[in-house]
Amino acid sequence: MSASTVTKKSAATAGPATAPHSLVAEFASADALVRACEQVRNAGYTRWDAHSPYPVHGIDRAIGIRATRLPVLIFLCGATGTTIGILLQWWTNAVNAGVEFPWVPTFLQGYNFIISGKPYWSFPANIPVIFELTILLSAFGAFFGMLALNGLPQHYNPLLRVDRFRRVTDDRFFISIAMDDPKYGSATRRLLEGAGAAAVEVADDVKESAPPRWFLRAHVILACFLLIPLAVIAYMRVDKQTQPRIHIVQDMDNQERYTAGKQMANPVFADGRSARPKVAGTLAREDFTQDPHYFQGRIGDQWAVGIPMYHPELQKLAGGAAEVNEQLMRRGRDRYAIFCSHCHGLDGAGVGRVATYTTEREIGFVPPKSYVDPDVLVRPVGHLFNTITNGIRTMAPHGDQIPVADRWAIVAYVKALQRAQTATLEDVPTDERSRMTQPK
Amino acid sequence: MASHGHTIDIFSEPRRFDRAGPGALIAALIGVAALAAGFVMKPGGADLRQFMNSYLLAYLFVLSISLGCLFFVLIQHVVAAGWSVVVRRLAEQIAGAMPLLALLVIPIVVFRTELYPWLNPTDEMKHLVEHKRPYLNDTFFIIRIAAYFAVWTLLSRGFLSASLRQDASGDAAITTRLRTLAAPSLILYGVTVSFAAVDFMKALSPMWFSTIFGVYWFAGCVLSGVGFLALVAMWVQGRGQLTRAITKEHYHDLGKLMFAFVVFWTYIAFSQYMLIWYANIPEETRWYLVRQSGDWWKVSLVLLLGHFCIPFVLFISRHPKRSKATLFVFAVWVLLMHWLDLFYLTRPPEAPEPLLAGSAGGIPLHLLDALCIIGVGGLFWAWVASALARHSLVPERDPWLKESLAFENY
């Protein structure tokens, strides 16, 4: 491209430095545009485009645009959505990860909720989520894929620097050929003029230059503002509040109710008790079982003194072993941390989060006894099991929340806590003892 | 636009049968003969109830097609569609068979006690049916059926005759007026089709509840209507008419509509199933329990695979919709599946107990099912074929026709 063919538009005004970018040809009608496109296409140009105020029938073929790859992209996105939908629900609800994949950290494990009495994995219930995710990701694929394949969003196009090009949104049709097209040469202008162009002009592009100072400053300031929410969150996480947090979504959290602990009178029942005794003549489901040791911690009318490791459910927790082993203990520790530690403390001393919280605020909560309290130390395992299942005095029952086998795992762990805290030097293996008595 | 070479002048295109071929008459004769033979001879030791069951199935199949095409006509008008003009007359004529269908509904009304248990409720039903009496009573039933056919006849004949008037006058104002009328017509259509679904099919199980049932049938109507429309278009082209006017672009769009309604049907069918399955209330689940017990679960499974999975996978791509041969397979297939769907809706016993006890026998397909579909189908085809022969096969002076002829998918 020789410099002489470059018609500088506003050469006189001292604007930013520019360089020729592409050749723009104007056409008066859509028909002329389509015919010209066919010629440009046949001449073998590749880096060019046609511009029109409205979609022109047949223009795709005239330009030689290949069929879009968008459908393939959408299909892949949709299939990804399907897969995520299936895996998500399978992992969060159908898998008892704690047992089946014990190496997965607790916060990544699912829930195993029974919903509406359906099996954990019940396909009809899963379909809506799978469907929605498929649609969502397909729509993302279609929308963002379309943008990406079209090179959008494009905030600036050098063609818009050509004055006559503005009529492209009105009543004129254009072809633009980029000067870095391998075919570009002196013949290009002739080709366009020969194809019926009403005018041919060079579009200049601004040479790259550093963005203005204010632009950078504005961005730095904006970025600082964006840090404010993060800072607030971080502050809130470490700050101690004396007032309860604002409770926006009430969800029936605070309402009048009868609590067993307060032993309130309830006028609905003739005997005035709010805590209902078992209905006469009925049996709890567990009363039916043939295995009072496993389900109730009892043998005859005595508390059981051994952990029922013969039971297959419990053996499953122990990785198939028929005795208390490390795996079972780990399971117990894990469940204990979830269900008990907030009251009893991780060490069982009775100073968990709930206890400290209530004591600090002088809310009437009687902290639990330490597990090494002489009263508790002598409890047989069956009694501990019963305490978890049915609660004891002011401690509420936990049987509804914790499966039977897990309760036994907790019992084993509580026993281990007691043992560890009442240990003497004699309990340490002889060859290790010297290390404990030696001064540092 | 000059740039596409395929725009044709409709007036140089064969678009009219010279005379009704003998096909229409033969179809009519076969139809009458089949129905008469079935009704009089009752083959295979059938009784009147069996005949009516088969008749209802065949009748609903044909009615669905006609109603589907009526919807097609209305929706094209309401959205001012350009592409569909070349096939719209065919749809108008298929929907225009409504007077015949109004005639053919008479046996169902006359022998309604053979079909609908709520007219003679069993002891088990009595209590519930008593509560549904304000709706499910004899007089109101007959009034409703009459009202449906009044509305459908008015709509289908009205849109057809307006379109024919435009053939003569070329008055573009007719198009504008029909567009305005199409919107309220669609509302009437939606209401009548929903209630008709309840009266014809859901009332076969008066103990059952489902609020989405009308939409379910509607989905099947449009699916079979468009499928049939595509087949008629192929038939017309096979007889040398409109050979250049209807292109693969139009077939492609008919295929898209079919595909969309395959998915829509599934969406509705699943919505109905899932809510009932989830809530698990006996009076709702019994309907599905019946269709899951005995041999009926096989029909349910074939429906799931054939009405959704297979066509979904095979016809999701554009290519099979753009080839006449594969689209033909698609159209025949959806018609078969729609028939099976109606069979599944109407034929199973009301109560699940005999199925659960294993004393119900297999799938009650009957020779009469074939005779009735030949009978009702023959009469229907005789009407459609002779109506097509009487007029131009395309709304030849519709202002959108040019756009339709030049239509292309991108």
Image (tube, coloured by chain):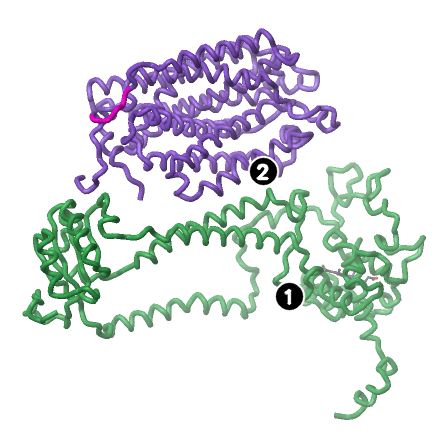
Chain colours: A green, B purple
**Which amino acid, by three-letter code, is at mark 1?**
Pro
Q: Identify the subunit bearing mark 2.
A: B
Q: Is residue B86 left or right of residue B145?
A: left
Q: Is residue B13 magenta?
A: yes
| Foreground pick, B244 / B268 | B244
Residue A134 visible to the viewer: yes
Q: Secondary structure at mark 1?
A: loop
Give the magenta-colored segment's residue range. Answer: B12-16
Residue, far bottom: A439
- Examine the residues drawn in magenta and state their main secondary structure: loop
Q: Is residue B259 above or below residue A249?
A: above
- Say whether marks 2 and 1 touch (CB < 8 Å): no
Q: Position of residue B301 (x, y in %)?
A: 60, 35
> Where does label 2 land, which residue?
B274
> Where does label 1 land, which residue?
A105
Q: Is residue A61 magenta?
A: no
